[in-house]
Image (cartoon, rainbow, N blue to C red):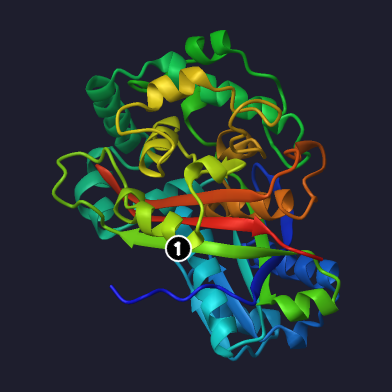
Amino acid sequence: MSRRLAYDGVVAAVPVTVPYARYSTHAAHWWLGRALAALIRESGIAKADIDGVCVSSFTLGPDTAVGLMQHLGMSPRWLDHIPMGGASGVVALRRAARAVQAGDAEVIACIAGDTNHVDSFRHTVSQFSRFAQDAVYPYGAGGPNASFALLTDHYMRQYGATREDFGKLCVAQRDNALRNPHALMRKPLTLAQYLDARPITDPIHLFDCVMPCAGAEGFLVMTEERARALKLPGVRIRSTIERHNAYPDDPIQFRGGWAMDRDALYEHAGVSPADVDFVETYDDYPVINLLQFEDLGFCAKGEAPAFVREHGFTIDGSFPFNTSGGQLSVGQAGAAGGYLGLVQALRQLTNAAGDMQVADARIGLVSGFGMINYDRGLCSGAALLERGTA
């Protein structure tokens, strides 16, 4: 492999969230537009000076990112549309950072958002992929619940994970969400409530499942010099990875693309897992958190259940994890779910996390996972970020 260049001179800044709603009559365009407006308002940068845009959305159709630019009255010289679900935030960050480094754009707005009409989720899963259209949805298995039940059952049988292990993560994330004004689920959750919740698709029960909602997330990518001139706290990018359709010969997914590129991620960043102060993973179902703990080097394959039993995962505890509450307690606003952890990490590393702030956080790891097709997710990514200077 050729030597990877560092992300010198580029920062991510201005994390924004458009508060989520369970249902919305607005289109995805409205939510994405609100994210852009928040970026303009918080940064003080004129809309005309944002010359690059990266967009992720499941419900933007029939428009693409190009059509959205007409709706928003923009003429960017750099534009990307990343339909990678939970991996979209990391992929957007790395694409935008390289574009700024190359001089293809000076300020790039990365935005993700979706609406949630009463029937939005049903429509999304029925048209999610050719596989969904032809081989799953017609037989009544549409949507991610059945797929993640398969992955969860396989992992439990293979490595001895229990529902109590998954429940511990869900309870910790709910505890974190109680500090998050944007979280839709604000009632405390006990392990007993988790275990007693109604089954959805065995072995998955109610609190293992994300709740679809409407909302948007966003951030800006620019040069460190520009951020400093604008007095915007910037976060440095130490390293990123992405991988697609990893380990295609595995009969059922028990590892993701992170495992293929983990060593390169840490080597490029010049840090180790022990240097990471907090972790934000994509968490549409708890089993994926355990895969990421293993594949990102915090424990060996099959040892995540023991790792879960050893740590607390709350903001103030050992191994601060999904400090916003994650999707399992905040909600899943479509493709914005792939930005949730990244936006939260930017808040952590710019002292903007409020009651969710992890003390003395210097290095954060964000990982993404997206585009589930029956027995595996196809997209994975991760980023190591470092506190910058204002």
Indicate the position of residue 251 as horizontal and vertical percent values: 14, 41
Indicate the position of residue 184 as horizontal and vertical percent values: 69, 36
Circle 1: residue type: His
Q: State which quadrant residue 165 falls in.
A: top left
Above or below residue 153? Residue 389 is below
- Residue 206 visible here: yes
* Most foreground residue, 27 or 248: 248
Q: Assess disc 1: are there few (<14), some (14-19) or many (≥20) residues with their C-alpha within 10 Å of its C-alpha.
A: some
Above or below residue 387? Residue 60 is below
The quadrant of the image that shows the C terminus is bottom right
* Most foreground residue, 290 or 54: 290
Above or below residue 355? Residue 241 is below
User: Which residue does the image show at 70% across and 45% down from the upper left?
Assistant: 361
User: Which residue does the image show at 44% across and 65% down from the upper left?
Assistant: 83
Indicate the position of residue 156 as horizontal and vertical percent values: 29, 22
Indicate the position of residue 241 as horizontal and vertical percent values: 42, 61
* Most foreground residue, 362 or 338: 362
The residue that mark 1 highlights is: 268
* Most foreground residue, 293 or 44: 293
Question: Quick one: SS at disc 1?
Answer: helix
- Residue 64 visible here: no
The quadrant of the image that shows the N terminus is bottom left
User: Which residue does the image show at 75% across and 87% down from the upper left?
Assistant: 49
**51 to the left or right of 166:** right
Above or below residue 275? Residue 127 is below
User: Which residue does the image show at 68% across and 49% down from the upper left?
Assistant: 362
